[in-house]
Image: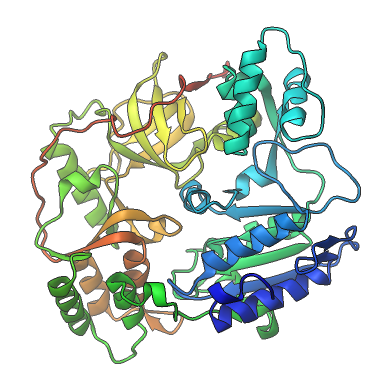
Amino acid sequence: MTGTALTFSDDQATAYDAVAGLLRGTGIDIEEGMLTPPRGETETVAAVIGKAGSGKTMLLAELVKALEAAGVETVSGDYEGRRRKDRRTLAVLAPTNKAASVLRMRGVPATTIHRIIYTPVYDPEYERIAEWLAGNGEKPEIEGLTEQALDRAHAFYQVQKSIPGALAAAGLRGSDFITGWKRREEPLDVGFVDESSMLDDRQFEDLKAIFPTLLLFGDPAQLAPVNQSGSMIFDGLPERSKLELHRIHRQEADNPILDLAHALADPDLGFEDFERLVEQAAARDDRVVLGQRVEVDLMARSPVLVWRNATRIRLINAFRRVHGAPEDALLPGEPLVCDGLELPLKHRKKRLDLEARGLIKGAQVIYLGPGRKPGFSRLHVIGAEDPQVSAASIVKIEKPDEEEPFIPFAARMGATFLHGAAVTIHKAQGSQWDEVQVFAPDLFAAARMGRVEAGQPLWKRLAYVAITRAQSRLYWVVRNRLSRPTYTLTTEDLRAAPAPLELEEEDMS
């Protein structure tokens, strides 16, 4: 390995060399910068695993740079240029919008799994602009678009490789240039999947059908998908196909949040012992806070992480109550979580439109206000590349001790939402926030129950996932109390964007 050895630990260097050898066997030589055409449909699957802070993302980013330098074409979810028989392609994927956005903020051109499985169909007129931006054609002349508009699109694309973003800079909306969505028919080449501990069997099979070469990056200490019986996709791979990283990097040696997460690996550590470690960390470092109450101001953008559903519902209702939210309406700035789509099979195009805009199950959303039609909402989709959208919505506000949720308003069908001021730790996987509050009484309840998952006490797995969602500060909340807000809910913190794209409700008759 050349050029990157000084920045890598020994285990990262070993993993890098192993992946380089794997790619060389498929005709991609990242060390010599040489490519040969794909060599048939041989399936290659490997995994890079390691706990938080072990350098998985750094390794992924360096591999992406090396592949791009070798001439491998990165495929995003927003546009795919004309095919060449000899081209080699890479797609970097994550299970959620938020996880993909975390990678993009680190310079890695990531997209969601859904956006690779389903590809956009462009209007032929505007496809000429896309081909020009991608370097595959001459600058076109488009009726209705000035030279200055095309120059704005080109300037945008030089900074951020997003075709929809560039077309938006030219004054176009998604409904102008994307006419629909179709399931990918042709396979791609190399796929990198971050947060692969979240993958279930069906997603894994879909990915293997698209990518002959698949590299999974995952954390074995996280929680397995609920339908996977405590196992993760990479658990079933042969040992020779798994490359393990360890947390030994100097730049993270003083991170108290990661110290606490890794302390959970001690089999003799009990819950009370762990809380003493939290208290000690909080006494010496302000990146850890031993909280006596839930800070309501943080809940608007960073949900409280809980284990029990009853706790989640109780905290959400307390949040709405202290903000004076009416029962029959949402306030602009309230956080939501997409709970899926309620659409019949005949409205497949509508479903693809919603999902392509980031409204997939688990997506975090901020309510901006009512849409122009009854039942429509203006929304900001956290982590989406084009975040503002107006869509038919069914909003459910769950109440303590009531089986049926209260629905303040609803379209006949569309995207369904739960409130997002608090979420379960399971739902938080794949996401990170600058500051995170963990509701410790719930984890104490899990510890008292004595449940075990995949050979480890469940409370430790829950604590590990919850703690590692925090990027800068961890609040370990030990009391069942809620602070009063110091400011009203707002949407001013959300970056201004072009007018939201209307996902019109089709005639449902």
Q: Residue at x 34, y 70 (%)?
A: 462
Residue 318 lies, with reference to residue 413, above or below; the image says below
| Residue 200 in view, yes or no | no
From the viewer's perspective, tell me whether residue 196 is left or right of residue 140.
Answer: left
**In this rendering, is residue 150 above or below 473?**
above
Q: Looking at the picture, how far across and down is residue 443, in whole percent?
A: 25, 70
x 82%, y 29%: residue? 137
Give the image's coloring scheme: rainbow
Query: How many marks do you count on the picture?
Result: 0
Q: Quadrant of residue 464?
A: bottom left
Task: Residue 465: give x, y in percent of width and height.
Answer: 37, 67
Q: Quadrant of residue 206?
A: bottom right
Give 215 or 151, whichever is nearer the viewer: 151
Quadrant the C terminus occupies: top right
Residue drawn at x 88%, y 44% is 84
Residue 274 or residue 200, whichever sits in front: 274
- Residue 168, given in percent of the width and then of the height, sits at 57, 23
User: Seen in the image, is 167 located left or right of residue 278?
Assistant: right
Q: In the displayed structure, would residue 328 be above or below residue 280?
A: above
Kindly tell me whether residue 47 is visible in this rendering: yes
Q: Answer left or right for 220 relative to 421.
A: right
- The residue at 9%/55% (across/down) is 481
Q: Quadrant of the N terminus?
A: bottom right
Displayed quadrant of residue 475 = bottom left
Q: Which residue, as the protein is rendered here, is positioned at the far top?
A: 144
